[in-house]
Amino acid sequence: MDSSRKDHRKDIVLEHIVEAHVATASPVSSKMVAARMGGNVSSATIRNVMSELEHHGLIEQPHTSAGRIPTNEGYRRYVSMRTNKVRQRKKEAERLAREYTLRVETIKEIIEKTTFLISRELHNAGVMIWPGMDNVYLRHLELVKVRSEVILAVLVTMTNAVKNYLIKLDSGIAVSELEKVARYVNENYAASPIARISDSMRETLDGDAVSDETGKILRTAIKVFDDVSKESLSNDIYWEGIDNFMDEPEFSDISFIRGLFQVFSEKKRELADILTRDLSSGDIKVYVGEECGLEMMRGCSMVTCGYFFRGKTVGRMGVVGPTRMDYDRALRTVSCLSDLISAKLDEFDVER
Amino acid sequence: MDSSRKDHRKDIVLEHIVEAHVATASPVSSKMVAARMGGNVSSATIRNVMSELEHHGLIEQPHTSAGRIPTNEGYRRYVSMRTNKVRQRKKEAERLAREYTLRVETIKEIIEKTTFLISRELHNAGVMIWPGMDNVYLRHLELVKVRSEVILAVLVTMTNAVKNYLIKLDSGIAVSELEKVARYVNENYAASPIARISDSMRETLDGDAVSDETGKILRTAIKVFDDVSKESLSNDIYWEGIDNFMDEPEFSDISFIRGLFQVFSEKKRELADILTRDLSSGDIKVYVGEECGLEMMRGCSMVTCGYFFRGKTVGRMGVVGPTRMDYDRALRTVSCLSDLISAKLDEFDVER
DNA sequence: TTTTGGCACTCGGGTGAAACGAGTGCTAAA
DNA sequence: TTTAGCACTCGTTTCACCCGAGTGCCAAAA
């Protein structure tokens, strides 16, 4: 048998090992692989192939006299054999699309619905980051006085998210003045990217003739948008369904669950940062085990994909589960949902 | 020894059993109780008392040849001996008070801070319900047009909570008209209890001379506030620190944790309802085990206390932990935090 | 050269007997 | 009424044992 065919068989065996292990959660024996391959090879042959795969670090034995399980590298190889052939199943896509036919008018609803669907479909945790400030467009601003020098800025974005920020001004301000500021912003900056509003205002202020009145308004508005951008530097994260983990045998160790839970609560910033880091591309990305950089994610994998608004990647969504995950299905579902919600988001954008 | 002194000793022994069990998490032996009582009674005497306590259903043996652990009834009795003597420790109260000296301007911040403090102080989960609509007072309303017949109502409450509701009108409406409605509401209903605004408007509408213009405004406003009240019938719940459970030996069984986690996620409504039910009183309340009515809370206790705004109980806050909980400390901490945040909330209310 | 049957070896898991010891209940004496 | 003493119980730990799934290697077959 020539070497290329031999390599191909190695991949086939690895595939079977991964898939059998995903299905059964226990080590896979040579006999089992032989059976899965139709019985036209003997287990002894498979044993030879397996020992090579082990040599390459793609599979390992939990102990002598046990079958093999894929290593992180094994999963990684398996995944890279898969990612280029993500074929969406039409029926599945249609079924998922129907889930969004009900009233979905805000990005909040989209995020809740999507993470819910991911967790339900894949029996794992669904995660999603909100669009960051540089990709969020203003629909409406309202300023509410809270105390003499403290105001509440309420922003409604083009994707109908309502965000509020408490802002401490340098000096007291009259309600009528606040109204003027809000009106000015709504008239001049509706549909602008929020992160760039304060800079654009500074230009106006530095530029030619600006009346005293307008100057005062601008200075307050600049303070507001500076604070807003500062307060939400990194994307916010939302998740759902982490209790699905608890069914998986690999998480029977409670300290594992605890660590993982912390990734989703106290340390959710770090998780959000990982997803934010990948925003430059909207492609599907797979992290196997600690690849993502979080020690506590050992034993877990994450399959994520960007979602789009106005043609730009504005956020990411995906699934977190054990490394022993049905990657094929995960890739399919995540990419399908990404398409669906990106289309939905663009509906928010039509001029009315 | 006369019978009243005898009964008193029973209580002392129960107290020691509860406290020792809380500390060690294992069954308490007669020898251990004798030692805790200063060694002037023998273990044999304690054994007699214990057998009586067992007879009364206050303690039980996990098996022969083991010490005793308190039953739910035992905890209940222990707690009722305690609740009337909740004495706040001054130093502790001052330490907690300092946690709120930093900027806390909105009820959201208060809720996050308080549940965090509860979970940190008591190493259990902190829970808190938001004030319900009938106790929430309007500070400001803003109406933003989303689509021809869909608007977004953004409410700012007196406690600086920002809530938003998507509302589907019966017919399209102009932006200028929306502005009029919002202005009318802000001028006439600021500082009113939100749940009663639509009724009050209906009265105005049914009453004497109302101009066509005002009538139109009122009808839209009524639709808005009807929808708002409808959408938030029950109080919203917030929690923090349920991972603290995972350290306790009684939760080493993962299915327990899973059930509990569901109480805090999918079934959080039921938990919120339990707290809402108790809103009539602001007193401290203790649920031992399934007393609260949730089967999944078996093995858990909940210590809650109301918090106040304008002298009325508007919400509840407390701690959820294993029945084997330091009730003394829980009662102290919860009641202390209730006082602190009620005072803080009232600061929001001063006329400005 | 590759595949395969055969076989010895490994090692985790399950089973059962035995020893241990913490804790009890009861009794009789203080 | 309290207490010392003692027999008894029963969960836990330990150890020896066996079973069987699975491997690695070798020599024969293809």
Image (cartoon, coloured by chain):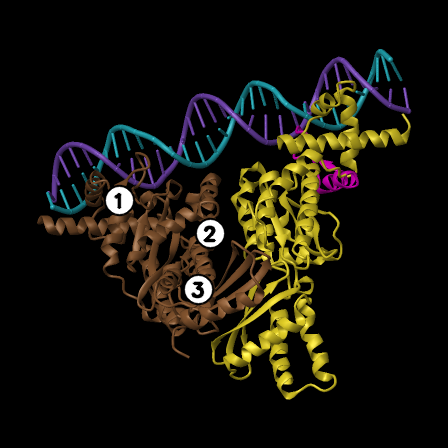
Chain colours: A yellow, B brown, C purple, D cyan
Name the secondary structure under disc 3.
helix
Near-viewer residue (B129 or B148): B148
Q: What amino acid is found at the position of numbered circle 3 in the picture?
A: Gly
- The answer to which of marks 3 and 1 sits earlier in the sequence is 1
- The answer to which of marks 1 and 2 sits earlier in the sequence is 1
Q: Give the x, y percent position of residue B107.
A: 44, 66
How far is mark 3 from mark 1, CA to CA? 60 Å
**Mark 3 lies on residue:** B215
Question: Residue A307: which numbered mark, if any?
Answer: none
Asked if labels 2 and 3 share a chain, the reply is: yes
Q: What amino acid is found at the position of numbered circle 2 in the picture?
A: Ile
Q: Which residues are magenta?
A: A58-85
Q: Is residue A70 magenta?
A: yes
Q: Quadrant of the C terminus of chain B?
A: bottom left
Pointer 1 and pointer 2: residues touching (CB < 8 Å)? Answer: no
Q: Give the x, y percent position of residue A32.
A: 69, 24
How far is mark 2 from mark 3, CA to CA? 50 Å
Name the secondary structure under disc 2.
helix
Q: Residue at x 53, y 84 (%)?
A: A171
Q: What amino acid is found at the position of numbered circle 1 in the picture?
A: Glu
Question: Residue B242: which numbered mark, if any?
Answer: 2
Near-viewer residue (B250 or C18): B250
Asked if labels 1 and 2 share a chain, the reply is: yes
Name the secondary structure under disc 1.
helix
